[in-house]
Image (tube, helix red, strand yellow):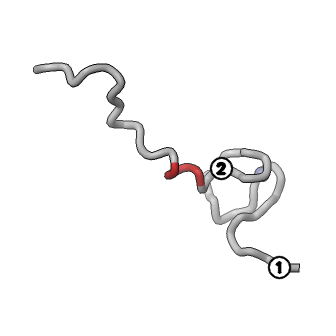
Amino acid sequence: MTDGGPGRDPDVGDPVCWLDHVCPECSAFNDDPGSPCWRCGITTAGDATG
Ligand SMILES: [Zn+2]
């Protein structure tokens, strides 16, 4: 077998995949982006006006 070369990580996906899981307010990682942030309580799902 031949080595493909360094710097190749097939396990690493696009960083955009987990961007939705990161809180835009406190940068906390939320397993469920649909639920309010466990740290600051902000909710990204549903833009509540008012
Ligand atoms: Zn937060």
Q: CA distance from mark 2 to mark 1?
A: 22 Å
Q: Position of residue 24 (x, y in %)?
A: 73, 53
Estimate the x, y position of residue 15 in percent, counting from the top left: 50, 45
What residue lies at 60% left-to-right and 56% top-to-bottom?
Answer: 20
40 up-or-down from 47: above or below: above
Whether residue 4 sits left or right of residue 1 in the image: it is: right
What residue is shown at x 36% (from left), y 24% (from top)?
7
Taking 1 as reference, is 45 left or right?
A: right
Q: Residue at x 79, y 77 (%)?
A: 48
Find numbered disc 1 in the image and state the secondary structure of the residue it sits on: loop
User: Of the numbered discs in the image, which one, if any, rests on residue 1?
Assistant: none
Tell me: residue 10, above or below residue 20: above
Secondary-structure class at tag 2: loop
> Circle 2 sits on which residue?
22
- Dot 2 or dot 1: first in sequence order is 2
**Could you classify mark 2 by the number of other residues whose Cα lies within 10 Å: few (under 14), some (14-19), or many (20 or more)?**
some
**Label 1 environment density (alpha carbons within 10 Å; few <14, some 14–19, many ≥20):** few
Residue found farthest to the left: 1
Mark 2 and mark 1 residues within 8 Å of each other at the beta carbon: no
**Position of residue 45 measured from the top left corner of the image (x, y, whole percent):** 68, 69
Who's the residue at 75% across and 64% down the image?
Answer: 43
**31 or 6, which is in the foreground?**
6
Count every numbered label the image shows and give the total. Answer: 2
Q: Nearer the viewer, mark 2 or mark 1?
A: 1
* Residue kind at label 1, given as amino acid type: Thr
Residue where numbered disc 1 is placed: 49
On the picture, is 10 further left or further right than 34?
Answer: left
Question: Residue 8 location, x and y as percent?
Answer: 32, 28
Identify which residue, 6 or 21, lies in the foreground. 6
Q: Amino acid at mark 2?
A: Val
**Which image quadrant: the N terminus?**
top left
